[in-house]
Image: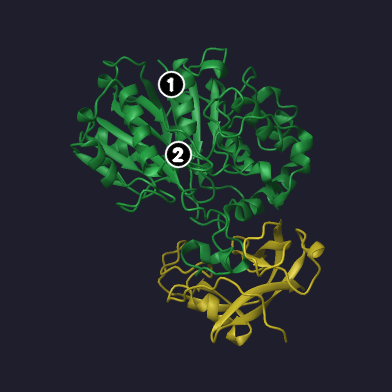
Chain colours: A green, B yellow
């Protein structure tokens, strides 16, 4: 047995709800849709599920908001008999999965349901929370940003992007290839909320949000949910679907935990996670068939590419030029479902669902033509960073 | 003097009082290790470099360099006209002490990486002094 236990754990099932810009279904119910779909996809029933985890923590009996499905309510809706459960803390958007791998390794449980539930549209305040003239109290880490009228990660990450883009010479025209490519991919994804192609002119003429980020550099808030079932590999092999194995995970945070205080700023927590992930496998960046990288803001995808060694720092702009290399038929198909910029923001969980579909050969019209054997997923930016390397044996 | 634009104000605690209220004496206060001299922001109860427990807020020069800039165009707060510049200032004492802030007393186009700046304060309520920066 490898000393890295994630190699003995697989994704056995994936599921995703419908996604809504203007929700007509309660966000919690969408999460139940996603969870039931993932369990069925794994060839299991709720009676087989003995673990559940989500990130971030959700308030019980409140089925909307930033995290719109508590493990309490999911457990009670699905009648789960749990040997282990976790809600909240851990390394970024994949915390639930990385924690679940640990729980399976310890023998607490065999099949863990992990999900992300977004319900910020149900109460229509997202991005308009202060439009009534109120001023929030600046608390926690946001106290270093809010007093300067910087309430959005768009503002904070823009400062990183400004430094990095000046240092490396990446242009906005080159960065534009990320949203343009993803919108093209979303055209092949019926689940995506935005599917009409955009051009470089559309991008360059779009209204600026916080320079260098225009509207098309920002992901699309939606209500919806994605879920996966994580299983002991030997049990996953008994099921109908091809199990997709974890080859390595990255959960590290070594430098200062803050948005601006790292010694190696403008690098982020994700740089530590990526480095740890590669330390746990003999595979290298050259083995990656498809990449599913966090795109809350386009520049984060660029930093993930460099952190993972998919491109060299300073050469990413040239790699993106024209967009052919990151297209479905390119050398590094990127965010093949349209990503958060076009399909909608499911906080890297939809990236994981898509990676599994590509590895199984089940991505339909957007299936990458070359054989997909290894896919990488990266989640988060700023103080949040975690990554997964998935393999189809 | 006209009323300043409203800002979201910090909830003051023992972990941030020196930073947000320390400007009462016209100076910026940052935690510093009495053992090895390293600065820390925000609050620590031990020096992460030498583990000394002798760490306390001390006045610093308030001088620094603009490291990065973003111009915000999104009207998050109706009372605050857009666009406005957000800057990241690296203090001259130590390069990893970086503060987000606003550039004041200068046209928005002045906000450029490399600009030398110095701290000034805007007072709110009785005891909160928000550190802002102006060209040095």
The residue lying toward the viewer, choosing from A257 and A119, is A119
Q: Position of residue A74 (x, y in %)?
A: 28, 41
- Local crowd size for mark 1, using a 10 Å CA cut-off: few (<14), some (14–19), many (≥20): many
Give SS at disc 2: strand
Residue wearing tag 2: A224
Q: Residue at x 49, y 24 (%)?
A: A375
Relative to A214, residue A316 above or below = above
Give SS at disc 1: strand
Mark closest to the chain's N terminus, 1 or 2: 2
The residue lying toward the viewer, choosing from A380 and A125, is A125
- Local crowd size for mark 2, using a 10 Å CA cut-off: few (<14), some (14–19), many (≥20): many
Task: Give the chain of mark 1.
Answer: A
Q: Position of residue A252 (x, y in %)?
A: 44, 44
Q: Where is residue A225 in the image (x, y as percent from the top left)?
A: 42, 37
The residue lying toward the viewer, choosing from A392 and A329, is A329
Relative to A15, residue B61 above or below = below
Residue wearing tag 1: A391
């Amino acid at each position: 047995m490898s000393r890295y236990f994630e190699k003995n754990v697989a994704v056995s099932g994936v599921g995703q709800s419908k996604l809504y810009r203007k929700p007509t279904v309660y966000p919690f119910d969408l999460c139940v849709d996603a969870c039931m779909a993932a369990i069925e996809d794994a060839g299991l029933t709720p009676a087989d599920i003995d673990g559940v985890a989500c990130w971030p923590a959700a308030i019980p009996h409140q089925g909307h908001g930033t995290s719109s499905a508590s493990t309490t309510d999911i457990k009670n809706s699905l009648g789960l008999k749990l040997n282990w459960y976790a809600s909240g803390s851990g390394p970024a958007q994949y915390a639930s999965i990385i924690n679940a791998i640990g729980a399976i390794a310890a023998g607490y449980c065999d099949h863990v349901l992990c999900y992300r539930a977004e319900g910020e549209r149900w109460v229509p305040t997202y991005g308009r929370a202060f439009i009534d003239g109120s001023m929030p109290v600046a608390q926690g880490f946001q106290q270093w940003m809010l007093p300067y009228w910087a309430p959005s990660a768009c503002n904070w990450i823009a400062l990183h992007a400004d430094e990095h883009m000046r240092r490396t010479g990446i242009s906005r025209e080159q960065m534009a290839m990320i949203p343009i490519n993803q919108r093209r991919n979303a055209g092949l994804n019926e689940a995506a909320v935005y599917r009409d192609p955009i051009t470089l002119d559309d991008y360059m003429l779009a209204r600026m949000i916080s320079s260098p980020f225009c509207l098309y550099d920002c992901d699309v808030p939606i209500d919806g949910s994605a879920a996966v079932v994580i299983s002991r590999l030997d049990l996953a092999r008994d099921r109908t679907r091809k199990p997709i194995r974890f080859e390595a995970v990255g959960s590290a945070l070594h430098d200062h935990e803050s948005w601006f205080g790292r010694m190696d700023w403008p690098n982020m927590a994700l740089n530590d996670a990526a480095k740890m992930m590669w330390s746990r496998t003999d595979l290298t960046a050259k083995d990656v068939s498809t990449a599913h990288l966090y795109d809350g803001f386009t520049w984060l995808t660029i930093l993930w590419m460099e952190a993972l060694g998919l491109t060299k720092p300073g050469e990413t702009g040239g790699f993106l030029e024209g967009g052919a290399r990151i297209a479905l038929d390119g050398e590094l198909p990127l965010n093949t479902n349209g990503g958060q910029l076009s399909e909608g923001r499911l906080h890297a969980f939809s990236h994981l669902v898509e990676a599994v579909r590509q590895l199984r050969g089940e991505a339909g019209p957007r299936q990458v033509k070359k054989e997909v054997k290894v896919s990488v997923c990266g989640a988060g930016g700023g103080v949040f960073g975690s990554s997964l390397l998935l393999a189809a044996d | 003097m006209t009323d300043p634009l409203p800002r979201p104000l910090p909830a003051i605690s023992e972990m941030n009082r020196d930073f947000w209220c320390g400007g009462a004496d016209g100076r910026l206060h940052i935690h510093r290790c009495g053992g090895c001299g390293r600065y820390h922001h925000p609050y620590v109860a031990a020096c992460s470099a030498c583990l000394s427990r002798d760490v306390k807020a001390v006045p610093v020069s308030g001088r620094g360099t603009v490291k990065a800039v973003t111009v915000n165009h999104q009207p998050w707060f109706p009372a605050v006209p857009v666009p406005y510049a957000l800057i990241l200032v690296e203090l001259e004492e130590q390069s990893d002490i970086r503060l987000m802030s606003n550039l004041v007393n200068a046209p928005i186009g002045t906000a450029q990486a490399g600009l030398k700046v110095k701290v000034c304060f805007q007072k709110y309520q009785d005891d909160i002094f928000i550190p802002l920066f102006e060209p040095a």
